[in-house]
Amino acid sequence: MIIDCHGHYTTTPKEHQAFRDAQLARLDDPGLPEPAPARISDQQIRDSIEPNQLRLLRERDGDLMLFSPRASSMEHHVPDPATARSWARACNDLVHRVVGLFPGHFAGVCQLPQTPEGPLDDSVAELERCVAELGFVACNLNPDPSGGWWVAKPLTDPFWYPLYQKMVELDVPAMIHVSTSCNPSFETLGAHYLNADTAVFMQLVRGDLFGEFPTLRLVIPHGGGAVPYHWGRFHGLAERMRRPPLAEHVMRNVFFDTCVYHQPGIDLLYRVIGPDNLLFASEMLGAVRGTNPETGSGWDDTKPLLDRLGMPEADRRKVFELNARRVYPRLDARLAAAGG
């Protein structure tokens, strides 16, 4: 089985964005009526999924994708908690409907209603709703709700502990995923995302989060940002800071996806990180769309890059299936119940 751990609903019907636009307009003009989530039919959802993510999943020999709301549209920098709650709920409900229409191909990962320096009560409540009521298997966690200004506390700070406690209770992991950047110095897709992946790993090296939460699991996307390329730097800094070896201090709980879009990068990722901590992913129809002119293949068609590694069958099964089932036990239980 081939499980893609990183997919976003980037093809939502236009009515969904119209609801968001109306939300933001009302924040600028409180005299406007409070908008209601868009009325979207099942057929509109099918039309948005079947020729897009589902078609590519099938064409590229994938079986199932972990599916979450569009990351750049989470827009956690908007400071109004009520707006964040309503927007996250609408986005998650739409993903839930996708899963309901295509249960063999998608599993839900929820957006949290975070705000800059806001409390986590709403995020904890939405996580519980999505997991307990909607059957989601994970969440996306934004370490920088300010949108590139980095006013949030490190993910190792006790501020985040109520969310971690709920994640451990529900036995779900989080993918570390920022949203859009409001800082003109950091372009969203090529800078802010990779900055966050790298920064969070260093936060984990410096802290002792997994000493507090030994069963907590985090997935760092986009191949881990700069981490694999600069593994010697992180290893050396950990030694200098007198931290425990990375293998036991961080890598028992942290996993990287394979959203790396060229062969040398995939080669390095596999050699440095190894098969036990890699989860297959493509982020298809995400940040890097279109065709690579040098190969004629889609930039986000990552499976052939992994195929060319010539991994032993045991490693291949870990990367494409078994690691995902280990990191996402609710997904594993769902597949087992379905006879998978």
Image: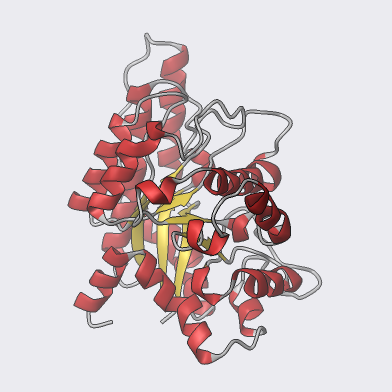
The residue under the point 44% across, 11% down is 29
How many numbered circles does the render carry? Answer: 0
* Residue furthest top as drawn: 31
Q: Residue at 28% across / 30% down in the picture?
A: 121
Horizontal relation, residue 195 to residue 329: left or right: right
Relative to 132, 119 lies left or right: right
Give the left or right position of residue 145, taking residue 105 as reference: right
Q: What x and y, as percent, mark residue 270?
A: 63, 74
Give the quarter of the figure containing the C terminus.
Answer: bottom left
Image coordinates of residue 315 in percent, x first then y, are 52, 83
Q: Residue furthest bottom?
A: 313
Q: Is residue 63 visible?
A: no
Which image quarter holds the N terminus?
A: bottom left
**40 vs 150, nearest the viewer:** 150
The answer to whether residue 168 is seen in the rendering is yes
Vertical comparison of 35 with 193: above or below: above
* 185 over 43 or under it: above or below: above
Q: Residue at x 50, y 81 (%)?
A: 61
